[in-house]
Amino acid sequence: MTTKPSTWARGAALRGLVALPLVAGLVAAGWLLADRSPEPAPVPLPVARDAVASGPSVLEVSAPVKAQEPGQGASGQGGKSPLQEWAEQLAGPLDIPADALIGYANGELALRSEQPSCHLSWVTLAGVGSAASNHGRGGANPMGLTAAQAKKYGGEAPIAAGRALCAGGTDLGAGAGWWKAIAAYHPGGESELFRQRVLGMAQLYATLSLDPASAASPRVKATRFALGQLGLPYVWGGNGPDAGAAGFDCSGLTKASYDSAGVALPRTADSQFRALPPVPAAQEPRLGDLVFYGNPATRIHHVGLYLGNGLMINAPTEGQAIQIHTYHSKGDDYAGAGRPA
């Protein structure tokens, strides 16, 4: 895959994020935080804080992993089609209305016929629907289509969205094509935040579709919380808006994520590393595991939350936002993973 460093600087005067140039010839993207003024003053913390140390800040462009196939075929004796049964089985675990899931599946199936080389997956459409409207719960434009897109591509919203994403012969099965298509779908000042949210939720949906029984687990609840913080600024010692800070530092994010799931963690990256059962080095981390950086013999200086498919949710360092990054790249100081739950 093509490597795409993604580093964003936070302008204090603007209270936003400004995209720095991206390497490897890929399209540069930037986005602004939603207006959070006036920011609450940080409160004193009674715990030790991680020293500022830059964590991984590289994102290799990647498409979400393969998901469970939508049901197809004629209705059974109960009168429900395989697609309806599929959607009803996944609606609760994914927290997506069954009607919306059917729409996303129909979008995939329609584009399989119209543009089979596009390799559009329903999880990509579900990621777009989540980022645009929380699956229709947030307004009358569930897929966030512009008026021009709706007029040009026509049909039901998920199918029109699929046509927009597949325009120009794009292959969404490849990381570079997927990344470029999502950026083109939602251009403008917040396109990078939109793209991160689509990637994060699409990856989560793909994983849960293959393991729906895990949906109520602490690790999935923690991951959902962490995804909800995308775009907040890194704040050294920050425990998040609920604790009076504009954002989080790395271990503040992982602790708050698991606090939301009822699992108590120590406060710092080093103490979390030493408190958790390690994941065997030969195994890839699973969704919800914590991934650590530093020297196990002396000090762990950074931690992120593993999302799957080589990705993590990361509060990298001062001047950057909480975002999705590749968890392990050549030459980094990755120290291993721990399993909170």
Image (cartoon, rainbow, N blue to C red):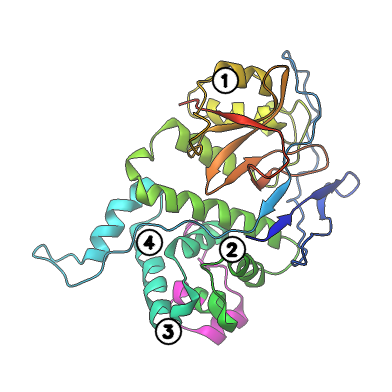
Residue 220 x/y as whole percent: 46, 38
Q: Work out whether 333 lies above or below 311.
A: above
- Secondary structure under badge 3? helix
10 Å crowding of disc 2: few (<14), some (14-19), many (20+): some
Counting residues from the start of the chain, the first of labels 2 and 1 encountered is 2
Give how far apart the Cα atoms at labels 3 and 2 are.
21 Å
Pointer 2 residue: 175
Q: Does 158 lie within the magenta span?
A: yes
| Camera-side mark, 3 or 2 | 2
Residue at the extreme left: 77
Residue 327 x/y as whole percent: 63, 42
Q: Which amino acid does the dot numbered 3 rest on?
A: Glu
Q: Work out whether 312 lies above or below 88.
A: above
| Camera-side mark, 4 or 2 | 2
Q: Is residue 228 visible?
A: no
Pointer 1 residue: 265
Pointer 3 residue: 114
Give how far apart the Cα atoms at labels 4 and 1 are.
35 Å
Q: Which residue is at 57% across, 68% downward? A: 144
10 Å crowding of disc 1: few (<14), some (14-19), many (20+): many
- Which of 283 and 95 lies nearest the eye of the viewer? 283
The disc placed on residue 13 is none
Counting residues from the start of the chain, the first of labels 3 and 1 encountered is 3
- Secondary structure under badge 2? helix
Q: Which amino acid does the dot numbered 2 rest on?
A: Gly
Q: Which amino acid does the dot numbered 1 rest on?
A: Leu
